Amino acid sequence: MNPLTIVRHLMLLVLVYAALVAETTIAPALDLGGPTIRPLWIVLALVVGRCQGNSVLVYAALLGLTSDCLRGNGPLGLDLVLASAAVQLLATARPGRPARPGKPARSIATITLTTLVLTTSIETVSNLVRNTTAQLDSNWLLATLPTTLAAATADALANSALVLASLLLLRTIQQPIAKLLLPTPLTN
Amino acid sequence: MVRSTSNWKPLAACLATGLMLGVLPEPVSESIRSGLLDLARPGQQAAITVADRLTAWHPFASPTRTVNPDTEELATLRLEIRRLRLANLRLSKPADNTPTTTPTHPPLITTGLVTVRVLGRETIQAWAAGRILDHGHRLSPGSLVVEPGHSTLDLGDGNGLSKGQPAYSGRNVAGRISRVGHLTSTLQPLTDTRFRGLARLARPGQDRPVFSTQGMLEGTGDGFCRLTRVPATAAVTVGDIVYTDGRDQPDHWPMVYGTVVEAQLPDGAPHWEIRIRPAIDLDQLKQLDVLTRNLNPGRNLSRPTTTPESTSSGVLAQ
C-alpha cells in the first residue's frame, strides 16, 4: 500500500475521532437557533471527496455506527445502513463520473453538495424510522414528516455552510502559502 | 452487454452488519454504546481543557466583555473561601495561647515510651499451671499479676511501669496500667467501666482536626465507650473523632480515643448521649507503648545554698 494512502487513512481516522468528540462536546454547545451541526456527516462527505473504492463504505459504516451509538434511541445499526446506502447511491448516481470511474471529486462545490445530500437523506430517514419505532401510528408519522424534513434540511444547510466556509478559508490560506513556496523566476 | 462497475458486496456486508446490530439484545447494544462513549472520553476531556484554556486566555480583553455568571460566582465563592480561611487562621491564633518564647531550662519531668508485649491467654494459663520453666529463678505462679478481663503485659515495676500510666497503640489510646507486679502488669482497657479520661471532640478539618467541645470518656463494658458532659449546645455529628485532652500528651499532640458512632440529644436533656467506638481492636493487641514520667536527671535537684540575707523568711518579712 502506498505510504501516502496510509497517512491519509490515519488522518481520516483522526478526523473521525475528532468528529465523535465534537458531536459530544462542541455541537451541543453551539446554539444556532434550531439547526444542529453534525460533524460525523461532514467527515463522511470529506471521505467521499478524498477516498475511493470500498474504504468509503468502511468509513460510512464506522461513522454510521458512531452516530447510532450517540443517538441512544432506536435500533443500533440504522445509521450504519443508511450511511452505507447513501454513500453507495451517491457514488453510482454522481453526474459526470463515467469519464473517470473511481476518481474522487475534490472540488469545494462537490464536497459541499455531498454534505448537503448526505446530511439531508440520512437525518430524514433516520429520524423518521426512529419516530416510527417509537410510535407506530401512520397519522402521527405523516404529521411529523414536514417537521422532520425541515429540521433535517436545516441541519444539512448548516453543515454545508460550515463546510463551504471552512474549505474556502482553507483555500484562501493555501494560495498565498503556495505562492511563497514557489521558486522565484529568474529575470534579466 | 454492459458490465456494471458497482460492486455491491461491500454494501451487502454493511447492510448485513447493520441488521445484525439491529437485532442484538438490549444489554449488548447498550454495552456497545457505552463502549463508544468511553472511547470518546479522553478526547472530550482534552476538548474541555482546551476550551477552558481558551476561555481563560484573553489577549484582547476589553472592559465590555460579557462575563459568564457561573464563572463570576465561582470567583466570588473562591474569594469568600479565602477570606474565611484567613479569618479562621486569625481567630485560631489567640486560641492557641502559645508563648512567644520557649523556655531555655531543661524540663523538670521527662516522658518516655516503654514498649511492652501483651501476653497471650495460653501463656498466662501455662504460667498459672506452673508449666513454664523458670531456669532456677524460683518464680511462683503468684508472681504473675492477672486481672480478669484485662490484658497482661510482660513488664512490671522493675522496668519503670506504675499504676495509672497510659498505654497507647500507635497514636490510639488502649487504656492504662491498672496493676503492677515485679515482672508483669495488667492493662485496664478504655472500654472498662471504671475507665475515665478527659476527652475532646474534633471534626476532620482540611489540614488538621478542628477541636471543639470537651467531655469525659467512660468505658461502657461492652466494647464501646461513651462521652459524657458534652453540653447540648455543642455540635456533634456521627464520625467526629474523640481525642485525649490535656497538656501532658507525648509530643504535645493528642491521642485518639475513637470515633462517634451514635449521638443523641433527648428532648430537654442538658447533655448529649454519645457512643464511641474505640480506634483500636483490643482483642488484636500484640504490643503497646506505655507512657512513663520521670524526674529529669539533667536538672539540679539539690537545694541551693542560701545566705541569711536571701532567705525566704527575710523576703517574706520585708
Image (cartoon, rainbow, N blue to C red):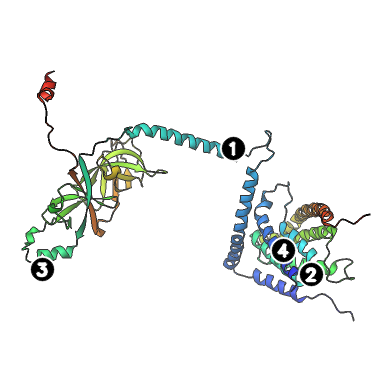
Q: Chain of mark 1?
A: B
Mark 1, secondary structure of its residue: helix
Q: CA distance from mark 2 to mark 4?
A: 13 Å
Question: Where is mark 2, residue-wise?
Answer: A52
Q: Chain of mark 2?
A: A
Q: Residues within 10 Å of mark 2 (few under 14, many from 20)?
A: some
Which of these two is toward me, B206 or B61? Answer: B61
3 and 4 marks in contact (CB < 8 Å): no
Q: Residues within 10 Å of mark 1 (few under 14, many from 20)?
A: few
Q: CA distance from mark 4 to mark 1?
A: 40 Å
For the point 20% across and 58% down, the residue is B118
- In the displayed structure image, the side of residue B152 where residue A80 appears, left or right: right
Question: In the rendered structure, which disc, 1 or 3, sits on the residue that comes first in sequence?
Answer: 1
Mark 3, secondary structure of its residue: loop
Question: Where is mark 4, residue-wise?
Answer: A12
Residue B82: percent from the left, percent from the top? 49, 37
Q: CA distance from mark 1 to mark 2?
A: 51 Å
Q: Chain of mark 4?
A: A
